[in-house]
Image (spheres, rainbow, N blue to C red):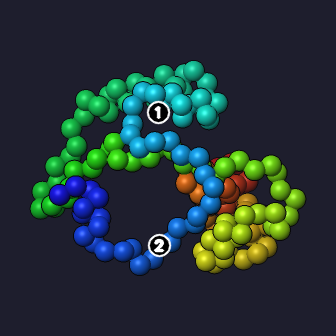
Amino acid sequence: MTTKEFLESRGEYPYGFTTDIEHDSFDKGLNEEVIRRLSALKEEPPFMLEFRLKAFARWKEMEPPRWPNLALPEIDFQDIRYFSAPKSKPNLESLDEVDPAILDTLRRLGIPVDEQKALMNVAVDVVFDSVSLGVAFREKLDAA
């Protein structure tokens, strides 16, 4: 059974929902080109790219764990998108300029309007696709 078949056999996830917004995504699959594109997109220093490439080479040599008493399908790592992010928008002046779909998602998550205005006060890391939009108590975490 493939991962997709396994997930489909479990039925619809009753607690989740999606937010349909414009986004940029990589095609499915993982290879050196994907790693290089991701590193370039994040404007990482050369040492970080080298670290990622070495880790990827090591990962390709590894065998997945075999857990006793669990009948889990093998993960198809080539059936995963390794980057997706909302399309870049200019800095916004007010919530009125935010995509209504994102505001609806924040509302559904129970994030109050005041906290939506200043995501820095939210007690979660708000992530859309592969991009963090805000982390709770950033100053306290930076000080730790």
- Provide residue 109's location: percent of width, then percent of height: 60, 74
Say which amino acid is labelled 2.
Answer: Gly
Looking at the image, residue 139 sits to the left or right of residue 70; the answer is right
Say whether residue 49 is left or right of residue 29: right
Q: Is residue 62 above or below residue 50?
A: below
Of 10 and 24, the residue lying toward us: 24
> Going from the N terminus, do you reach mark 1 or mark 2 first?
2
Name the foreground residue: 43 vs 89.
Answer: 89
Calculate the distance from the C-alpha at mark 1 to the C-alpha at mark 2: 28 Å
Across and down, in percent, residue 84 comes to 54, 48
* Residue at 67 percent of width and 61 percent of height: 136
Return the x and y of residue 123 as percentages of the image width and height: 64, 67
Give the SS element for disc 1: helix
Circle 2: element type: loop
Q: Note whether residue 32 is visible.
A: yes
Based on the displayed image, in which of its 4 quarters is residue 133 positioned?
A: bottom right
- Say which quadrant the N terminus sits in: bottom left
Q: Residue at x 50, y 72 (%)?
A: 17
Give the quarter of the image for residue 29. top left
Q: Residue at x 63, y 55 (%)?
A: 22
Do callouts 1 and 2 mark residues in contact (Cβ within 8 Å)?
Answer: no
| Disc number for residue 122 | none
Tag shown at residue 16: 2
**In front: 21, or 13?**
21
- Camera-side residue: 66 or 32? 32
Tag 1 residue: 34
- Image point (29%, 58%), residue name: 4
Crowding at label 2, few (<14), some or many (≥20) Cα neighbours within 10 Å?
A: few
Name the kind of residue labelled 1 in the image. Val
